[in-house]
Amino acid sequence: MITLGIETSCDETAVAVLKNRQILSTVVYSSMHLHKKYGGVIPEIATRHHVEVISYVLKEALKKAHMDLKAMDLISVTQRPGLIGALLVGISFAKALGYSLDVPVIGIDHVIAHLWANFLSKDYPKFPFVGLVVSGGHTSLILVKGVNKYRLLGQTQDDAVGEAFDKVAKILNLGYPGGPAVEEKAKGINKTDGIRFSESFSRDPSLDFSFSGIKTAVLYHVKKRGGVEKLKEKEISEIAFGFQKEVCDTVVRKAISACKNEGVTNLAIGGGVSANSRLRKKIAEEASLNGIDFFIPTLGLCLDNAAMTAVLGYELFKKGVRSDLYMSGFANFDHSPS
């Protein structure tokens, strides 16, 4: 079965072609270069960029897959969550293609799709498993009992983990996006010489997250020292290290707790922050110590892409799920069979 995946939830315009679970092509074109000077994604700019490039991205994906558009059996498109204007570009494009080709269209939950990036490799998690999604807009723990059987265990109460990285990077004048910038600055630091950050909510036994406190702690730390301009490069690196360590340790601790609470031994991770090397190392160590099998996508599939959208659509299609042409990014989401 040939599935066309379309992803336009934020600043990446992505199209992928899959044969069952095999990736034939995946093309991602980002508008990040247009947002850098603003320190974050501007929804209107992202939306216009999707409109401008989506046809070309589709053409490139079909070319790389050596496929004709008429060969598509299914179209899978990100329906929510995301920037509403950006979502509607992809949804409208998918519905037009589905109608003209007379093939089914399935709307996909972007957060769940991040977990399904793990199903694009030969080694993938078995049900049930705990899913950890860590990205610029989401930090969630989800119990996954089947392709369309989910239960939310915990989520951020304020900033997402990727958002916290962006804000701390801005405080330290490290640029945007913040995740790679903070990680790079923290390299080579093995201890923080007393610079340690924590946030009381992170120690809470619940499976919810809060990163606003640690972000504020970093801000006050920098202000007390006269601003980032007064800091030496080593101290900036130590701050980046201390922040990254506490955030990654908190995320891993709660993910392991979720597995223990639910009595499952499989943990799958997805989202852009799952590309962070410290997080990957820490989760591998803790999973091994606790007898948990963990799964994490290759680096190229951690960020937003359409292959994860396509593979989830393919699995849902086999379960009888269908969407109609009335779907929009405003609708409440339901992965139940129609």
Image: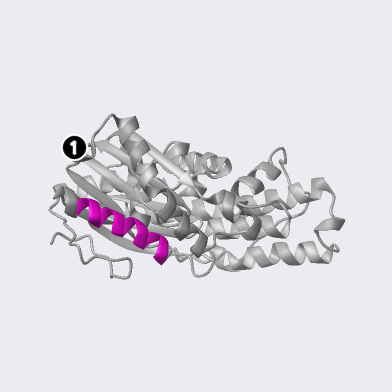
Say which quadrant the N terminus sits in. top left
Residue at the spot 66% in from the left edge and 54% down from the top edge? 243
Question: Is residue 57 visible in the rendered structure shown here?
Answer: yes
Range of residues picked out in magenta: 84-98
Position of residue 21 measured from the top left corner of the image (x, y, whole percent): 26, 36
Left or right of residue 247: residue 267: left
Is 96 magenta? The answer is yes
Residue at the spot 30% in from the left edge and 31% down from the top edge? 65
Q: Which residue is mark 1?
A: 71
**Picture quadrant where residue 152 is located:** bottom left
Question: Is residue 146 visible in the rendered structure shown here?
Answer: no
**Picture quadrant where residue 250 is located:** bottom right
Position of residue 160 measured from the top left corner of the image (x, y, whole percent): 52, 61
Left or right of residue 295: residue 213: right
Principal secondary structure, stretch drawn in magenta: helix
Residue at the spot 36% in from the left edge and 55% down from the top edge? 110
Position of residue 278 measured from the top left corner of the image (x, y, whole percent): 58, 42
Position of residue 60 measured from the top left corner of the image (x, y, whole percent): 37, 37
Choose between 325 and 221: the one closer to the eye: 325
Q: Amino acid at mark 1?
A: Ala
Dot 1: what SS? helix
User: In the picture shown, does residue 157 fall above or below 11?
Assistant: below
Q: How many marks?
A: 1
- Number of other residues with Cα within 10 Å of mark 1, as a class: few under 14, some 14 to 19, many 20 or more: few
User: In the picture shown, does residue 266 fall above or below 251?
Assistant: above
Choose between 9 and 296: the one closer to the eye: 9
Say which quadrant the C terminus sits in. bottom left
Residue at the spot 49% in from the left edge and 48% down from the top edge? 272
